[in-house]
Image (cartoon, helix red, strand yellow):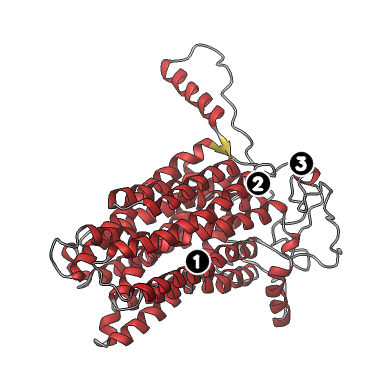
Amino acid sequence: MSRGELAQYITLTVAIAGLQFAWSVEMGFGSPYLLSLGLKKSLVSLVWLAGPLSGLIMQPLVGVLSDKSTSRFGRRRPYIVGSTVCSVLCLAVIGWTRELAGGRATLAVYLAVVAFYFLDFAVNCLQASLRALIVDVLPASRQDAGTAWASRMIGIGNVVGFLMGFLDLVRLLPFLGSTHMQVLTTIASAVLGATVAVTCYFTSETPLLQPSLSSSDDNLQAFRALFTSLHALPTVIKRIFRIQLFAWIGWFPFLFYGTTYVADLYVAAHSTDGGTDAELMERGTRAGSLAMFVQAVVSLGSSMVLPLFTYSAATGSLQPPPPPAGSISVFERGMRALLAVRARVAVSLPTMWAISLGIASSAMMLTLVTSTVAMASVLLAVCGISWAVAMWVPFSMIGETIRGGSNRTLGRQQMHAAPGGASDYVQVAMGDIPLEAIDSHSEDGSGQEPDLDARPPSEPTELSAGTILGVHNVFIVIPQFITAFASSLIFAVFEHLQGTAPDAAGGQHARQIALVISLGGLSAGVAVYLSWQLRRLA
């Protein structure tokens, strides 16, 4: 890798680190913050419907609109800047909710909930644009490296975000706010703005000179075609969508309640130490933040190491170094030995994904029998390995397929170009299916070759990077609906049976959360099976 390529990877993906920092504030501290405002745990679950609702609407919509944007600043940049400004405003409202409400508790809750909803919409818009930008800028042979760097930036954002949550920010940075949430949202806003500025300044986009569709009716038709054209997607991408559906049913309870789970275990273990319930819960939240910080460190380390031991369809399996032409030094012999070992143990992207999902599924189900803060923290840390892979492998495989990453694809590729011959749409056609997949692994399991020419030539499938990633996100956000409703129902049942318990009853709360997380682990187990099958196609 040259210095120029390294610089491009960093500047292209650094905004994802800022985005993840802001997202870690919401995911890691949103639930405890809403609970501190007086919202019931069962209602907190419903608040997080903002995530799937915004993802279901924003990412496909932004994908379609940005694919056809003719802005002189580029297709993705206007959406990146606009969503960043909105995110910063929402973070400010969240940090100063009580002050804006003027001491009225009910109004504070409403303001916080509305701000979280708008923040989710803005974050989904920003995420869709940044992911599509990576696919736009990098060629197929560098998609895996680009998404690996995006995973590393996610790890860095998580590490910094949860570290900030663990520190006593009010004492360290009193000039940024009088509460922990105020200081945290201020820092998150600054980091997000700075990293987005770097990506926008150093990344070059080629403006789209001619939109593919010319009327508002066609725009609406294109948006509807997002889901009616799913059958035209490559088999590998459709399989990835299925895996994501089950995998994210497991991930969302972990993301939403990981901090609260550890905090409740801490409260249960220290309920007799003295102090008010609010002070005890704040210390518990700090303990949860520390656990998530360790998880983020593990995830960051995994994102640095694991890509070295995987190969993709575009790069092919790793080969040991050839025999040396002459005598070599001891250091060179050692490096060659390490490269030979690396080539022997390296696995394909789908295999790495299946292994990581197995680790996550096991750790999630073990929360049901965990009763100590230390053990819970270990389980969260182990999930960091799987989280790094989840932020890298599926996006890499999708990016490679979109860009025609495999050199063993069918020649009958349909070019999804704008009218007039402008080839602004990438190759995403029925042809992007490995030959061996069509020979023996058809969708219906019959082994028969699918009808690749079923769609008439007069009806092209105009799908490009932003559109496909938008549809992909739908299969990530649907699990949020499932987990939000299921967890809300579980918590409501326990609240009805036990009544309103004080914060000191953290042990009961922790067991309820563990039940939700372990059920997610069962769903992740289904994803393990599906991803193991995917190895035959990739």
Q: Which residue is mark 3?
A: 436
Q: Which residue is mark 2?
A: 534
Residue placed most toward the observer, 348 or 506: 506
Residue placed most toward the observer, 155 or 69: 155
**Amino acid beneath label 2:** Leu
State the CA–CA distance, disc 1 to disc 2: 25 Å
**Amino acid beneath label 3:** Glu
Q: Position of residue 73 (x, y in %)?
A: 55, 68
- Evaluate if marks 1 and 2 touch, with contact meaning CB atoms under 8 Å apart: no
The first of marks 2 and 3 along the sequence is: 3
Q: What's the mark number on residue 483?
A: 1
The first of marks 1 and 2 along the sequence is: 1
Asked whether residue 164 appears in the rendered view, the answer is: no
State the CA–CA distance, disc 1 to disc 3: 37 Å
Residue depth check, mark 1 versus mark 3: number of the one nearer the observer: 1
Q: Position of residue 86 (x, y in %)?
A: 43, 75
State the CA–CA distance, disc 2 to disc 3: 13 Å
- Evaluate if marks 1 and 3 touch, with contact meaning CB atoms under 8 Å apart: no
Mark 3 secondary-structure assignment: helix
Residue at image coords 87%, 64%:
456
Q: Residues within 10 Å of mark 1 (few under 14, many from 20)?
A: many
Q: Residues within 10 Å of mark 2 (few under 14, many from 20)?
A: many
Residue placed most toward the observer, 56 or 328: 56
Q: What's the mark number on residue 72?
A: none
Mark 2 secondary-structure assignment: helix
Q: In the figure, residue 98 lies in which quadrant?
A: bottom left
Residue depth check, mark 1 versus mark 2: number of the one nearer the observer: 1
